[in-house]
């Protein structure tokens, strides 16, 4: 083994302990009561960068949760890489569905179970450990490195967007690297060539000025919950078609090579996804293959509905207010602010008479298509081939990482999206996990990527 490989192998247990320490911090960015925990997670990341040997490390205050910035710029003539990650995590509800406490890292069957294990503390930590290993073995890094870690990715990312847009000069680089994506399987390395954008909204329907007795007022009172059901049913039909006028107008057809891959599905992803979800069939626009539907088509999903009485027993109430959380995933040609305006208009047009409707844009971001020929992508491709022993496949991912499009727009650099998550890692769900094999393989791959880029 090389010195680098030996170092990584000898320190795997400590690397895992460092990850566990970070995972134990409940850095839930959307819940105000965890603001102190979010700050603690930021400081944990800053200390790790200092231990690695970064010359400059700072925790940057924002209007929301802090950013963590670090830099090591002692490789003259070599490229500069901006590394991104996030240390905030999703809420853990429903907590009763967790097999073990959500913030107590637990090892089972070669996986580490904990909120944030994969998204994104585990993936960010493996990048830190690749940097540590290179620095420990060589006394330096092969390229110049800047690190920018945020604490609001799961809450809209407003602070990092403001920082990048108003302070782009310190972030100047030749390429950006994001380790927050997935592979189809543990032996199928992949690079992500595209991401969807997103709008996340709240639709509020107001009926009467107060809750009403359904016996006294039923038959004449508007019911906001029923009104919401009508609105939602008009926005998307049973076949998965979204009925928002203008939504599809700017959707650019995919390249023929992508369409061929989606149709043939040579690795049988669709069936694997069906089995992984535990459903009897895949739903949606049957005229588009499943791989296209999850990566390159617009989606509309309802995430939650609140209103009225949902406790044990019975309460015959007509609620005064009902709310729904609704998101749309947007292929790169669809601009989030433009689509929100179309969505808002469609909601109002779909609303029945007798209610007042308010539509709020909670957060949004743009999609991205990656150029495969840039040197950073070539270096990543080679690193995956060297580590996994086979050529990686190129996939679009259905999720959204708005900061990727932001780096491309503001910094004008290619973005490498190379992550090591797996489809069954239960992101945003109970029993989130991360494969330890992927964690350790990821460390080796990222180290090779930076060496190749040099």
Image: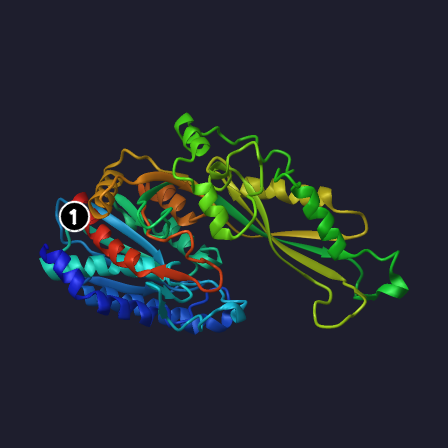
The image quadrant that residue 268 belongs to is: top left
Q: Which colour scheme is used?
A: rainbow
Q: How many marks?
A: 1
Secondary structure found at label 1: helix
Q: Who's the residue at 14% across and 50% down the image?
A: 142
The residue that mark 1 highlights is: 451
Q: Position of residue 121 (x, y in %)?
A: 35, 62
Please determine whether, in this image, residue 53 is positioned above or below residue 447: below
Q: Position of residue 221 (x, y in %)?
A: 85, 58
Q: Who's the residue at 70% across and 71% down the image?
A: 311
Please determine whether, in this image, residue 291 is positioned above or below residue 432: above
The image quadrant that residue 89 belongs to is: bottom left
Instruction: Pick whichever, 313 or 269, lies toward us.
Output: 269
Say whether residue 51 is left or right of residue 161: left
Instruction: Pick whichever, 72 or 96, lies toward us.
Output: 96
Say whether residue 2 is left or right of residue 324: left
Say which quadrant the N terminus sits in: bottom left
Q: Where is residue 220 in the image (x, y as percent from the top left)?
A: 88, 56
Instruction: Pick whichever, 164 or 303, lies toward us.
Output: 303
Are there few (<14), some (14-19), or many (20+) residues within 10 Å of tag 1?
A: some
Q: Is residue 36 visible?
A: yes
Say whether residue 138 is left or right of residue 214: left
Q: Can residue 345 be seen in this view?
A: no
Q: Who's the residue at 44% across and 55% down the image?
A: 157
Say which quadrant the C terminus sits in: top left
Q: Which residue lies furthest to the right in this view?
A: 216
Q: Where is residue 332 in the image (x, y as percent from the top left)?
A: 46, 38
């Amino acid at each position: 083994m090389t010195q680098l490989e030996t170092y990584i192998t000898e320190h795997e247990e400590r690397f895992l302990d460092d990850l566990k320490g970070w995972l134990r911090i409940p850095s839930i960015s959307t819940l105000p009561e965890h603001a102190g925990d979010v700050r603690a997670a930021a400081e944990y990341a800053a200390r790790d960068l200092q231990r690695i040997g970064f010359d400059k490390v700072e925790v940057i205050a924002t209007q929301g949760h802090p950013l963590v910035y670090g830099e090591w710029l002692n490789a003259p003539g070599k490229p500069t890489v901006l590394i991104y990650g996030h240390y905030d995590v999703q809420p853990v509800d429903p907590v009763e569905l967790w097999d073990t406490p959500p913030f107590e890292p637990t090892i089972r069957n070669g996986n580490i179970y904990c909120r944030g294990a994969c998204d994104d503390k585990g993936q960010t930590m493996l990048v830190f450990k690749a940097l540590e290993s290179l620095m420990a073995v060589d006394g330096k890094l092969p390229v110049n490195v800047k690190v920018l870690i945020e604490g609001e990715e799961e809450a809209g990312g407003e602070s990092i967007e403001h920082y990048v847009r108003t302070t782009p000069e310190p972030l100047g680089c030749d390429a950006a690297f994001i380790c927050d994506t997935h592979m189809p399987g543990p032996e199928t390395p992949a690079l992500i060539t595209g991401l969807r954008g997103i709008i996340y909204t709240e639709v509020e329907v107001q009926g009467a000025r107060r809750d009403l007795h359904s016996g006294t007022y039923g038959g004449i009172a508007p019911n906001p919950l029923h009104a919401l059901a009508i609105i939602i049913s008009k926005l998307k039909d049973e076949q998965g078609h979204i009925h928002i006028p203008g939504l599809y107008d700017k959707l650019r057809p995919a390249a023929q090579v992508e369409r061929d891959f989606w149709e043939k599905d040579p690795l049988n992803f669709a069936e694997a996804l069906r089995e992984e979800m535990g459903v009897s069939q895949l739903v949606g626009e049957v005229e588009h293959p499943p791989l296209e539907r999850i990566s390159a088509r617009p989606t509309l999903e309802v995430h939650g509905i609140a209103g009225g009485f949902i406790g044990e027993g019975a309460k015959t109430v007509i609620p005064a207010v009902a709310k729904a959380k609704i998101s749309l995933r947007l292929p790169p040609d669809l601009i989030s602010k433009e689509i929100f305006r179309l969505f808002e208009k469609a909601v109002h047009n779909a609303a029945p008479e007798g209610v007042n409707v308010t539509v709020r844009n909670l957060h949004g971001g743009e999609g991205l298509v990656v150029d495969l020929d840039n040197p950073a992508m070539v270096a990543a491709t080679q690193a995956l081939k060297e580590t996994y022993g086979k050529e990686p496949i190129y996939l679009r991912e259905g999720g959204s990482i708005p900061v990727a499009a932001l780096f491309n727009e503001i910094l004008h650099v290619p973005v490498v999206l190379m992550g090591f998550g797996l489809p069954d890692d239960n992101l945003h769900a109970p029993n989130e996990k991360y494969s330890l094999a992927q964690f350790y393989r990821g460390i080796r791959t990222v180290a090779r990527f930076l060496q190749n880029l040099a």
